[in-house]
Image (cartoon, helix red, strand yellow):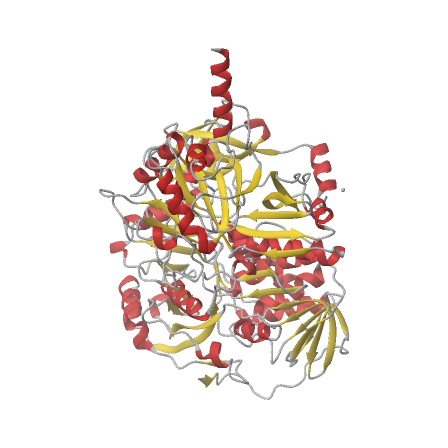
Amino acid sequence: IRRDPKVQWGIRLKFHSRWKDTADTVIIGGGCVGVSLAYHLAKGGMKDVVLLEKSELTAGSTWHAAGLTAYYHPGINLKKVHYNSIKLYETLEEETGQAVGFHQPGSIRIASTAVRVDELKYQMARAHWHPTPQFLITPERVQELFPLLNMDKVLAGLYNPGDGHIDPYSLTMALAAGARMYGAQIYNPAPVTGLTPTSEGTWDVQTPHGTIRAKRIVNATGFWAREVGNLIGFQHPTIPVHHQYVVTATVPEVKALKTELPVIRDLEGSYYLRQERDGLLFGPYEKMEKMVLQDSWVRDGVPPGFGKELFESDLDRIMDHVEMAMEMVPVLKTADIINIVSGPITYTPDLLPMVGPHQGASNYWTAIGFGYGVIHAGGIGKFLSDWIISGEPPYDLIECDPNRYGRWTDVPYMCAKARESYGYNNVVGFPKEERFAGRPTYRTSGVYNLLKDKASMGFHSGWEQPHWFCKDGDDAGYKPSFRRTNWFGPVGRECKLVMEKVGVIDLTPFGKFTVKGRDSQKLLDRLFANTMPKVGLTNISHMLTPSGHVYAEVTITQSAPGEFMLITGSGSELHDLRWMEKEIMEGGYEVDIKNVTEDFGVLGVAGPSARKVLQKITDEDLSDAGFKFLHCKTIKLAGIPTQAIRISYTGELGWELYMEQKDMAALYQAIMAAGQEEGIDNFGTYAMNSMRLEKGFRGWGAEPADFIGKAALQEVKAQGLKRKLSYLTMDTDNVDPEGNETIWLNGKVVGNTTSGAYSYSTQQSLAFAYLPVELCSVGQKVEVEMLGRKYAAMVVQEPLVLTEPTRTRLQKKSKSKA
């Protein structure tokens, strides 16, 4: 490790005002993200905002960053973050009087293979309904914008005007000036030495200069995030990686240009390249086997005093990429290298940051794990500020929720995934992508060993869960594509199985909680916009935010008086638990809430013969009259030497059986043996999703549907809706909707899909979509964009396929009439 020779050492105390003993919010960390949050909170009207920086602003990863800014992001929600960042950076200099060094020459993502062209078309279909400017351009237009390219391999480009780069140091100083202008206090050097929670939910933040009592604290400490987390018992899954970029001397061909070159990203070469004064700057992402983790910092901590130092560079490690860059931009071959910057940037296992309040510690927030902090800083500062001030997130960013990780995210897993994420930085972004490093974790269900060799597994919050099952003659393995691929036929077979016979699915990844105690009913009445079910009954309920948005969808069963079981989606486990714990603390409820997600396995048994199969292994009456829709019982099963098993009849997923993990394999085998005559077999989540859409069931996280949010809902009802969720059928060929595709009418963008799939029962593609109210009538025709084409679609009455209980009821009614 070496120090940056340009940095002047000998830091003095930089307090611009008197030390404060109390604060509304204390932000720990003075990189661009932390300072952006201070700026936004103060600008938003919060009076007591304090930022503590251990050495000097930008120390860590900010000061040496390449400073790239891009509207583009493959994820839908993070596009908003990028957009808000760029819009802030465009006006920040005028607002604060501080220069930010913002260049906006645009950027081009280069496609040099046919599958890359598909990827660009796929992303275009997801961008038109956003305000982000983005265009698919021809090779001729690419060359016009970047005349120094070797065009031999260029097939297309994805062009974002307005992209570019900014000076990270100047950006941070401008944000700091703005924060102070609006009343925030920034103290440095002020290292945090201790964090102590109080019984009131506040925090005592200890520093060498004194203690601050804060209503909330925000960890924005970059690669020190684990160390600050350790102060309160958290081991955040963040790890520094070595990232290198190369800076050249003046290149005559660059100097001769009249306009600045756009940033290019050579996806096959896995590097970015931009103009740096009259030279070039380019940074590669090495493959997994060559990249370097600074894992000693995980084990031993960051070296004391490290802040504006760099690692020793290693040009040999990136030579493959250097050579590819020279081939794509030939002037590099004769360019002189004047600097190689090798510095630490922070990665999480999935490369996305951890943003928001953290479960398990009241009023502890994180803004950590930013591999791309400069482009995220402005938007994330605004997102978190709005959330802190208003009490709810301004939009959905659940993919960045810090609570998506749990105990299963251990150090070996984190290291394996960080290597994979860095090395896969520019791999093709297929739909239904799976990455396999670090898997499986310890989170495997009781039937995993029985199913792992038969199924293509998906990864859900640490769990392995079958996506689809392969039989003799099928094309096995993970083979991603933008079009229908090897799982299409087998999934159709599974749908037919469940519609005509009986199938079994592993649903163990569901998040599961028990709630009991004197105030259990009172708490749930407050949390959920629904009446709680009576004992032995189940319903689906929603937790709402104060403004009436859906925060979570939960299945609730009252198993005994005052005792409830709550079931949520696998990705919402700690996300939902945190929300409930917050209400318990603030409302002073006397309840006991327990996370039992890992304690219980879950099997779903679905299809017209499901009831008959299960009846074979229990003396409990499972007839229509004896066990009705949305009822729940605790039963004994023949031949299963275990405690009683909880069983509920939910209709769409058929029967759900909850048992201890240790008993799951025996129960699964008993069910499979009992169902041989009925043709029982396995099915996975792909089939389940297809059948969900056929029956018009919304998907949580895709179709968001005196309790919290009641007043807001009443106001929405009074004012009326501007858009509604509609149900579409589509005329497609070898491609199906996934969700987030753009919807067109008469050449104009009118909406977007939220989820989609192929319906094997009706032999057509289906999608849910948000459309203006005036376009939601049955029979309305629109077009859905996929892979560069616009496919005809029509609004239809939902559902196209009735649920199993409804079909059974109608069949009985028909027979009685006959």
Q: Residue at x 66, y 61 (%)?
A: 40
Asked which quadrant contains residue 8, the reply is: bottom right
| Location of residue 65 with respect to 703 vertically, above or below | below
Could you tell me how many numbered marks the image carries?
0
In which quadrant of the rendered image does the N terminus lie? bottom left
Residue 645 picture location, percent across and down: 51, 46
Residue 370, visible in the rendered structure: yes
Side (left or right) of 206 relative to 414: right
| Location of residue 410 with respect to 54 vertically, above or below | above
Q: Residue at x 54, y 73 (%)?
A: 226
Which residue sits furthest bottom?
10
Residue 158 vs residue 20, the one in the foreground: 20
Residue 302 picture location, percent across and down: 51, 80
Residue 712 vs residue 160, the one in the foreground: 712
Side (left or right) of 571 relative to 145: right
Side (left or right) of 720 relative to 104: right
Residue 744 picture location, percent across and down: 47, 33
Which residue sits furthest top?
818
Residue 524 vs residue 10, the one in the foreground: 524
Side (left or right) of 570 relative to 340: right
Residue 682, visible in the rendered structure: no
Residue 164 picture location, percent across and down: 47, 60
| Location of residue 320 with respect to 126 vertically, above or below | below
